[in-house]
Image: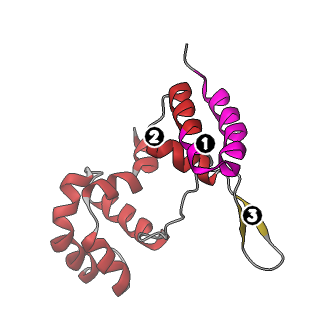
């Protein structure tokens, strides 16, 4: 019988307290038991038991308690901002709603022509971004707009 994820988390919380207080020999025994119960890899198990519930002092007033099971996502800054989206949408409409795989290779030739005839107004940084954009990124950015036209 396998343990559910909730049971594994509860077990991790209980065993990690015992593991952190144990001597080196006892840690090996606890590790073997935990690996047998959960089916986790031994290296991952030692990481879980070592770091679960550990207190980390951020500054003199703040102490954080680590939860190994919690996932943290880093926020990445957007390369292609709203200006790029607006111009890309306009170019896409001018080109009769073609897919990103066809639009991306033509962007190098198309953008100077559209700027010359004042079909789109683009500043230099936005133009550079449009020249570097990939086909899959074009499709991802225009995904909501494509739903409107279908």
Q: Is residue 9 left or right of residue 103?
A: right
The answer to whether residue 139 is left or right of residue 63 is left
Q: Nearer the viewer, residue 102 or 66?
A: 66
State which tag comes first along the sequence, 1 or 2.
Answer: 1
Pointer 2: what residue? 42
The correct choice, above or below, for 88 with respect to 140 in the image is below
Residue 56 placed where, x, y %?
70, 66
In x, y percent, where is residue 88?
36, 65
Say if 127 sits above or below 78 in the image.
below
- Name the residue rendered at 29%, 80% in the picture: 128
Whichever of callouts 3 and 1 sits on the residue coming sooner in the sequence is 1
Q: What is the spatial separation of the Cα atoms under label 2 and label 3, in whole angstroms?
A: 26 Å
Quarter of the image where the N terminus is located: top right
Q: Can the viewer see residue 122?
A: no
Magenta residue span: 3-28
Local crowd size for mark 1, using a 10 Å CA cut-off: few (<14), some (14–19), many (≥20): few
SS class, disc 3: strand
Please tell me whether residue 22 belongs to the stretch shown in magenta: yes
Tell me the tag on residue 64.
3
Q: Is residue 73 left or right of residue 61?
A: left
Task: Mark 1 and mark 2 in contact? Answer it, CB < 8 Å.
Answer: no
- Residue 10: quarter of image: top right
Pick the front one: 5 or 144: 5
Q: Is residue 40 left or right of residue 150?
A: right
Ranked by sequence position, the earlier of labels 2 and 3 is 2
**Residue topped by disc 1:** 26
């Amino acid at each position: 019988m396998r343990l559910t994820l909730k049971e594994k988390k509860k077990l991790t919380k209980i065993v990690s307290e015992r593991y952190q207080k144990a001597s080196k020999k006892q840690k090996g025994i606890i590790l073997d038991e935990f690996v047998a119960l959960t089916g986790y890899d031994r290296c991952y198990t030692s990481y879980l038991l070592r770091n679960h519930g550990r207190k980390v002092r951020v500054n003199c007033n703040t102490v954080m308690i680590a939860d190994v099971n919690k996932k943290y996502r880093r926020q990445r800054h957007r390369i292609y901002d709203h200006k790029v989206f607006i111009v890309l949408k306009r170019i896409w409409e001018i080109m009769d709603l073609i897919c990103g795989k066809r639009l991306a290779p033509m962007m190098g030739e198309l953008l100077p022509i559209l700027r010359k005839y004042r079909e789109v107004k683009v500043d230099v940084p936005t133009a550079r971004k449009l020249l570097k954009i990939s086909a899959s990124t074009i499709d991802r950015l225009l995904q909501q707009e494509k739903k409107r036209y279908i």
